[in-house]
Image (spheres, rainbow, N blue to C red):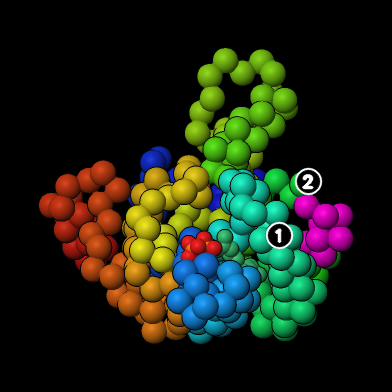
Amino acid sequence: MSEAGASPSSTLEIPPHSAVPRHVAIIMDGNGRWARRRRLPRIAGHRRGAEAVRTAVRACVDRGISYLTLFAFSSENWRRPAEEVRLLMKLFRTALENEVAKLHASGVRLKVVGDTERFDPKIRKLIEQGEALTAGNQRLTLTVAANYGGRWDILQAVTRLLKNNPQLETIEETALAPYLAMSYAPEPDLFIRTGGEQRISNFLLWQLAYSELYFTESLWPDFDAAALDAAIASYRTRERRFGRTSEQLEQSKRADVA
Ligand code: FPP
């Protein structure tokens, strides 16, 4: 297993509470609309989106957030026009070529989760090299979900678990957890989706069980440090009960202070 051993499952234990979320997961939506409003091609929106990624990484480092997970390309995004897919792949490749050294210098560990088999071998090589170079960094773990889908993740985890344990008749949560793509991270405290839609879109289906959900009309290229602060401020107002009553929560807070 991984450091997630120290991060309890939200359905089995009450996770530790912190004013700053430990793990923020984001669906970066609205690049296309940002471009359309300016009569620019959609790819111009994705380019600005990549800049917003840089801003978000820096803001998370500055705020002491330990894990940032970004949905860059879903299992379903292959359905987009071939030219847009090609340009998104090119953008991902350029970002890997140009940004990994900077991420490393900032103490960021890069992880990529998803079914990367379908990617160009050059992209796969860059992912492998980027992950290896930054593996020891501890300031922020930046996870890029690429050709990722929540259902894909659960199914690949079950498949690998059963391959290693063909005798299993029932599956315990604790047995499955180490096989999930993000087993190295605690579950997200805060989920953000930009672009106005209010859905999970097959993102981290398992891991979002008890995450606080935050939806904003801001389009991803406009999502800056102040927008992140607004999301964190909303998160701070939430009562994270994890299935308990408000009274139980108050009692446990009093016990923590005593
Ligand atoms: C959603 O906007 C965005 C994507 C499918 C791609 C996200 C990619 C980036 C932000 C750039 C590259 C990322 C990295 C990690 C280097 P949309 O196209 O669905 O927007 P729309 O809903 O307005 O059409």
Q: Nearer the viewer, residue 17 or 91?
A: 91
User: Could you tell me how far apart the alpha carbons at marks 1 and 2 are, in whole angstroms?
Assistant: 20 Å
| Image quarter in which the C terminus is found | bottom left
Q: Quadrant of ligand 1?
A: bottom right
Counting residues from the N terminus, which is met first, the one under dot 1 or under dot 2?
1
Q: Which mark is residue 41?
A: none
Left or right of 121? Residue 251 is left
Q: Point out the frontmost of discs 1 and 2.
A: 1
Q: Nearer the viewer, residue 209 or 11?
A: 209
Name which quarter of the figure residue 135 lies in.
bottom right
Hey, which residue is sitting farthest front in the picture? 39
Residue under label 1: 83
Q: Residue at x 69, y 18 (%)?
A: 166
Which stretch did the figure color magenta? 119-127
List x then y, in percent, for residue 25.
Answer: 48, 61
Q: Amino acid at mark 1?
A: Glu
Left or right of 10? Residue 172 is right
7 in relation to 99, above or below? above
